[in-house]
Image: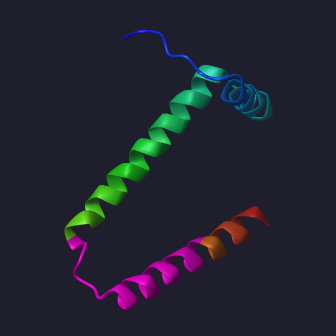
């Protein structure tokens, strides 16, 4: 695999996260890519259901899911 070029803004974010989490920059990148891949895998599992619901029903379902996730995030941050 060839070299990967990252801009300064992204490098600063990675460095900052590495310091905060007391880990390496490589570990931060590995975690980020792994997390992204997992999210994409979950999203792809939902694709067979695309188009089953009417638009209004789908919007209501998504809003309910997002609200539920936000509530859980708040609970964990406390």
- Please indicate whether residue 11 sits to the left or right of residue 48 in the image: right
Please say whether residue 29 is one of the residues in the magenta stretch. no
Most common SS among magenta residues: helix
Residue extent of the magenta highlight: 49-69
Of the 4 image quadrants, the one containing the N terminus is top left
**Label tally:** 0
* Position of residue 61 measured from the top left corner of the image (x, y, whole percent): 42, 84
* Position of residue 48 measured from the top left corner of the image (x, y, whole percent): 20, 67
Of residue 29 and residue 22, the one placed in the foreground of this image is 29
* Position of residue 31 measured from the top left corner of the image (x, y, whole percent): 54, 35
- Please indicate whether residue 3 sits to the left or right of residue 44 in the image: right
Depicted 2 relative to depicted 6: above or below:
above
* Position of residue 26 measured from the top left corner of the image (x, y, whole percent): 59, 21
Of the 4 image quadrants, the one containing the C terminus is bottom right
Residue drawn at the location 37% of the way across and 90% of the way down: 57
- Please indicate whether residue 6 sits to the left or right of residue 40 in the image: right
Please say whether residue 50 is one of the residues in the magenta stretch. yes
Residue drawn at the location 52% of the way across and 29% of the way down: 30
Residue drawn at the location 72% of the way across and 29% of the way down: 9
Picture colour scheme: rainbow
Of residue 8 and residue 22, the one placed in the foreground of this image is 8
């Amino acid at each position: 695999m060839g070299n990967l070029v990252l801009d300064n803004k992204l490098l600063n974010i990675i460095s900052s996260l590495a310091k905060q989490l007391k880990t390496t920059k490589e570990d931060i990148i590995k975690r980020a890519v792994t997390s992204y891949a997992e999210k994409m895998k979950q999203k792809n599992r939902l694709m067979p259901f695309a188009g089953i619901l009417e638009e209004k029903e789908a919007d209501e379902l998504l809003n309910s899911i997002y609200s539920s996730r936000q509530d859980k995030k708040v609970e964990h941050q406390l």
